[in-house]
Each structure stands twice: as structure tokens, then as C-alpha cells.
Image (spheres, rainbow, N blue to C red):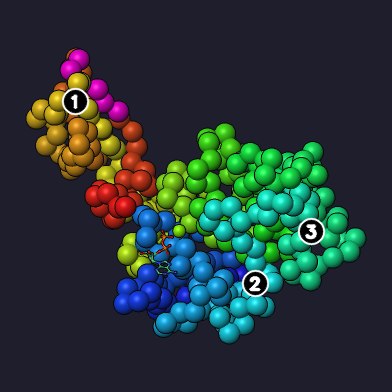
């Protein structure tokens, strides 16, 4: 399949007077992984709900897998998998029953589904826990089961809302590998995240949203090249003092957050020379990344 699996134009969704999604244009190419990034309240979940046909747009047009949504959302949904934000597994059922019950929603049953359930349990590395109750599973196992459940109908497009939020690093890396395997199988992934390293590792394209609008989109490396200097030096003073003025920062774009000074530059060498032998300062020299882009575009003030 070629072309876009999701095509949104001028999408608007209001709650009361407030627009949660405020004129979003979005195109998700077939194959690969597209990451929808944004701070809390940016409108990511609402955008996914519109794509899933779970909410009606107030304006705009939307096609998903070639079907107009919400008009023919059910036909689109039959070819999509969903991993919702948070845990929506049935705690009273076993691992296997969760998959079987979900398959039934799609009208799927019989030997082919039983084979598929076996394969999904293997994929999720839960074969040994097939008869375990969901409430006895760890957070990582639950999330793997939620991903397996989303695959029950062999979907072309898998939509995941913050799939790794709250998971520890081992579990996250493990889940990333599973998600990359889905892309390798030719499925399209659309996921939301506020972990920038997740987006950098998984997504070929990212869309940065804030306050219901798309601020920027493209491959992560392109966005880094477009919006921030390639090198960053983060400087911190000892004992919570503020960082003094330093020679070599002349060629830097400086941002100060609390007790940290971020120096963005095309050439960190003069600053690194000035930092040499400064026992009163600690510093980190690193390449710029998507998080720097994200903070530059969405600002550094706190969002509650
Ligand atoms: N069902 C709803 N009723 C009222 N307001 C909502 C509803 N869903 C979302 N919102 C509001 O819309 C905005 C975007 O929310 P959401 O799409 O959940 O953002 P994100 O997933 O990026 O954190 C927020 O201000 C949120 O409070
Ligand atoms: Mg959300």
C-alpha cells in the first residue's frame, strides 16, 4: 500500500468554547512510525480519538485507510489496532481471555483466531502467562498484553497513546523492540509520546503539537538541523550557585533554566577551553536532540 493512511485537513474539536484540536492538518504515510509529540493538553489524545471515530470533529475532513471518518469509522476501525492511554484490560479475565474477548468484538472466532492468539502471546512474550489473571501481571506485562490485544485483528494501522508512559527503562526498551518489529512487518504506527528519545528511536517522522495546533513536522534529524545549533553545553555551578559569565559563550545562544545554563552553538571549542580547569562548574557537552527542538518550540515554562 502506498500513500497516506491518515489524511486530516483543518480538523477542529471544541469542548465548551475551547478548541482542543484547532485546525490540524496531518498526513500519516503508509509504513513506518509517526510520532505525535506535545506537552500535556496539546490535543494529542483528542486527535487520536477523532482518527478512531470516537469523537466527532466540529470542522475539517478526515480519511483513515481510505474511509471517510466518522461516517465510515467502523470500516476503518476493523483495519486498525488501538492501544489506549492507560490500562483498559479486563482485570477479571486471564491474559488469553482478554485477547479472545477482544477478538469477538471484531466478530473473530474459531481455530484461526486461536492460532492468532498463540502467535500474539509469543510476540508479547506472555505465552507462559496465558492463564494468569491480568491483575497478577506487572506493568510491563500489561502493556505488552495491551499491544498484543491491539493486533488481534491483524491491523494495517496501529494507534498507540503514550505506550510507554510510566514504564521503567528495561520495559521501555523491550517494548520499543516489539514496536519496531511491527514496523518491520509493514504495519503503520501512529503513536503519541512526550518522551523525545522514544520518538527519536522509533519514529521516522514526528509532528509537534501544542495548544491544538501543529507547530512543526518532519524527520527528527531534520527538525534538529532546522531549529537548533548542533552542539549543546549544559553548565551547572556547584552548590546551587548561579553560573558566572564565561569567555567563549559569545558564539552561543544561551538559555538559563534554574541553575543550568544551556549553550547552543555551532562550535563548542572556545567554551570548552574556558571550562577547562573550572572545578567550580560541572558541564555536559552533547549533540543537540529532539528534546531541544521540542523545548524551543513549546517553551520551557511548566504545564500542569
Ligand atoms: N472530553 C473532554 N471534555 C472537556 N475537555 C476535554 C475533553 N477531552 C480533552 N479535553 C481538553 O482538551 C485539551 C486537550 O486534551 P488532550 O487531547 O487529552 O491532550 P493531550 O493528550 O495532548 O494531553 C485539554 O485542555 C483537555 O482538558
Ligand atoms: Mg493524552
170 lies above or below 75:
above
- Asked if marks 1 and 2 touch (Cβ < 8 Å), the reply is no
Residue 105 drawn in magenta: no
Is ligand 1 within 8 Å of the beta carbon of the residue shown at mark 2? no
Q: Is residue 217 at all visible to an observer of this figure?
A: no
Which residue: 35% across, 67% down? 212
- Asked if marks 3 and 2 touch (Cβ < 8 Å), the reply is no
Foreground pick, 114 / 232: 114
Q: CA distance from mark 1 to mark 2?
A: 53 Å
Residue 281 drawn in magenta: yes
Check the picture and name the quadrant holding the N terminus. bottom right
Q: CA distance from mark 3 to mark 2?
A: 18 Å
Q: Is residue 109 at all visible to an observer of this figure?
A: yes
**In this rendering, the label closer to the viewer, 3 or 1:** 3
Q: Specify the segment rendered in magenta.
A: 279-284
To which residue does mark 1 refer?
240
Q: Name the residue furthest right.
A: 111
- Residue 242, position in %: x, y? 13, 29
Describe residue 254's horizontal placement relative to residue 168 as left or right. Answer: left
Q: Could you say which quadrant of the image residue 112 lies in?
A: bottom right
Which residue: 70% across, 46% down? 134
- Residue 77: mark in rendering: 2
- Residue 209, position in %: x, y? 37, 62
Q: CA distance from mark 3 to mark 1?
A: 56 Å
Local packing at callout 1 (Cα closer than 10 Å; few below 14, some 14-19, many 20+) is: few
- Residue 107, position in %: x, y? 79, 71
Q: Could you say which quadrant of the image residue 160 lies in?
A: bottom right
Amino acid at each position: 500500500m502506498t500513500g497516506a493512511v491518515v489524511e486530516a485537513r483543518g480538523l477542529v474539536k471544541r469542548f465548551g468554547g475551547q478548541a482542543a484540536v484547532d485546525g490540524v492538518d496531518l498526513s500519516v504515510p503508509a509504513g513506518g512510525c509517526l510520532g505525535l509529540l506535545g506537552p500535556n493538553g496539546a490535543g494529542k489524545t483528542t486527535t487520536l480519538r477523532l482518527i478512531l471515530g470516537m469523537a466527532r470533529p466540529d470542522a475539517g475532513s478526515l480519511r483513515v485507510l481510505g474511509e471517510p471518518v466518522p461516517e465510515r469509522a467502523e470500516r476503518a476501525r476493523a483495519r486498525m489496532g488501538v492501544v489506549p492511554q492507560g490500562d483498559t484490560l479486563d482485570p477479571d479475565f486471564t491474559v488469553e481471555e482478554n485477547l479472545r474477548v477482544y477478538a469477538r468484538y471484531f466478530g473473530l472466532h474459531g481455530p484461526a483466531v486461536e492460532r492468532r492468539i498463540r502467535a500474539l502471546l509469543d510476540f508479547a512474550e506472555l505465552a507462559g502467562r496465558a492463564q494468569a489473571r491480568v491483575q497478577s501481571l506487572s506493568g510491563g506485562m500489561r502493556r505488552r498484553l495491551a499491544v498484543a490485544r491491539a493486533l488481534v485483528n491483524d491491523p494495517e494501522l496501529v494507534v498507540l497513546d503514550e505506550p510507554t508512559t510510566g514504564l521503567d527503562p528495561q520495559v521501555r526498551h523491550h517494548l520499543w523492540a516489539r514496536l519496531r518489529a511491527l514496523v518491520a512487518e509493514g504495519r503503520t504506527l501512529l503513536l503519541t509520546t512526550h518522551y523525545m528519545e522514544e520518538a527519536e528511536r522509533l519514529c521516522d517522522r514526528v509532528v509537534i503539537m501544542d495548544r491544538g495546533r501543529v507547530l512543526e513536522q518532519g524527520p527528527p534529524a531534520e527538525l534538529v538541523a532546522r531549529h537548533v545549533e548542533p552542539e549543546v553545553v549544559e553548565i551547572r555551578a556547584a552548590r546551587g550557585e548561579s553560573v558566572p559569565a564565561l569567555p567563549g559563550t559569545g558564539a552561543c545562544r544561551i538559555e538559563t533554566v534554574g541553575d543550568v545554563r544551556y549553550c547552543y552553538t555551532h562550535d563548542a571549542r572556545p567554551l570548552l577551553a574556558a571550562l577547562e580547569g573550572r572545578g567550580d562548574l560541572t558541564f555536559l557537552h552533547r549533540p543537540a536532540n529532539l528534546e531541544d527542538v521540542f523545548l524551543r518550540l513549546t517553551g520551557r515554562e511548566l504545564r500542569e
